[in-house]
Image (cartoon, rainbow, N blue to C red):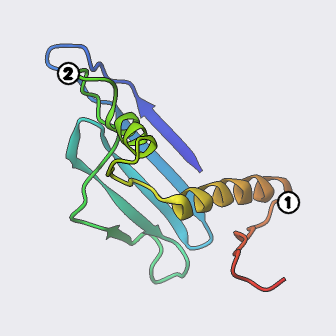
Amino acid sequence: SGTSLLPGNAHSDPPVGKRIEIKIFGTKGAVIYRGDDRDPLSGKLEWLRGEDDEAIGAVEVQCPDLGFEFEDLDQDGNGPASLQCFIDSCLGLEYYVGADCLTGLRSVQTIEAMYRSHVSGNCESIIDLNEES
């Protein structure tokens, strides 16, 4: 996996966004999420296929209507939207759920499998909690 970040300047006039690119490589190609954090229309989630000779290099855009959503950078108020949602949840108020507990669990499991893969040199599977032991 890899991440690249070209810093912007949220305090300049006009503000300049960060260019963000996250790549996760696997046995069937790579998933790429990239864009400008100040412009939701700037990016997308792509799957660069690589699992068979006919599809190698083919790009499939996943969720084409969602664009590039990243943390907001507005300087007004009491912090970013993620912090406000956390506070609202602590207060028992309604809040936006950007990633639920299953998404968090899968993220941790994916990172853990990446570490295991680095050590073993092999593709490692993600643990499925619904599997019988």
Give the residue at x 34% y 47%.
93
Residue, disc 1: 120
State left or right for residue 19 relative to residue 126: left
Which mark sits nearer the N-terminus, 2 or 1?
Answer: 2
Query: Farthest residue toward the top?
Result: 12
**What amino acid type should be assigned to the residue bearing mark 1?**
Ser
Image spot of residue 80 (x, y percent): 33, 31
Sort mark 1 into few (<14), some (14-19) or many (20+) by Cα contacts within 10 Å. Answer: few
Gap in Å between the C-alphas at discs 2 and 1?
A: 44 Å
Residue 27: image quadrant is bottom right
**Residue linked to disc 2:** 15
Query: Is 101 located above or below residue 54 in the figure?
Result: above
**Crowd band around label 2 with a 10 angstrom C-alpha radius: few (<14), some (14–19), many (20+):** few
Q: Nearer the viewer, residue 87 or 18?
A: 87
- Mark count: 2
Q: Amino acid at mark 2?
A: Pro
